[in-house]
Image (tube, rainbow, N blue to C red):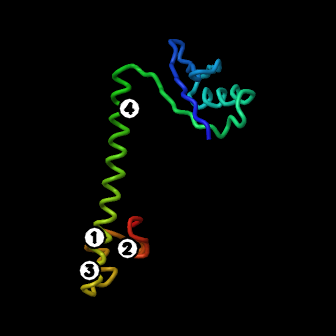
Amino acid sequence: MSEHHVTYRRGKDGWWRASVRGLRCRSRARTLRKARLQLRERLAPLVEDAFTIDFVEDVKLPGDARKLLVRAWAARRRAKEAARQSKEAARAALQALRALRVDVRDAGDLLGLSQARVQRVLEAPPGEA
């Protein structure tokens, strides 16, 4: 699958401008999504299948907005990792409680999980709790 580097810039008029590095291919639209779609349509005559290529995207934003966006992405990654760790901890605790012959309902009450969630955690393969 081919890869193309795309730069997006927002003009003073509020419209997004997109350009593909190394190709004379540009688009202009009110939304990023539309700019991306137009770019693919304009790439169609130049590449084999414009709708399956990967775009490596660089969205140019003012410094403060960029910093806040990066902070939001980092927070989302941390939250995802914390959720994974929480699920694994719940799985280990459930296994320990079940080894002590604690009822599924009681184990759920102790962990603050519904009975259905306890069953899903117990049935999930390790790493997917």
Q: Give the answer, above or below, for where 34 lies relative to 14.
A: below
Q: Earlier in the sequence, mark 4 or mark 2?
A: 4
Q: Residue at x 36, y 37 (%)?
A: 72
Query: In this orientation, which residue lies closer to the viewer: 88 or 109?
Result: 88
Residue indicated by mark 3: 97
Q: Earlier in the sequence, mark 1 or mark 4?
A: 4
Task: Find residue 68 and report its horizontal and vertical position in percent.
Answer: 34, 30
Q: Specify the amino acid type for callout 4.
A: Leu
Q: Give the answer, above or below, for where 13 lies relative to 88.
A: above
Q: CA distance from mark 4 to mark 3?
A: 42 Å
Q: Specify the amino acid type for callout 2.
A: Val
Secondary structure, mark 2, is helix
Q: Earlier in the sequence, mark 3 or mark 1?
A: 3
Q: Which mark is residue 34?
A: none
Q: Residues within 10 Å of mark 1 (few under 14, many from 20)?
A: few
Q: Give the answer, above or below, for where 21 lies relative to 83.
A: above
Q: Are marks 1 and 2 in contact (CB under 8 Å)?
A: yes
Q: Which mark is residue 118?
A: 2
Task: Find residue 122 and report its horizontal and vertical position in percent.
Answer: 39, 75
Q: Which mark is residue 69?
A: 4
Q: Which mark is residue 111?
A: 1
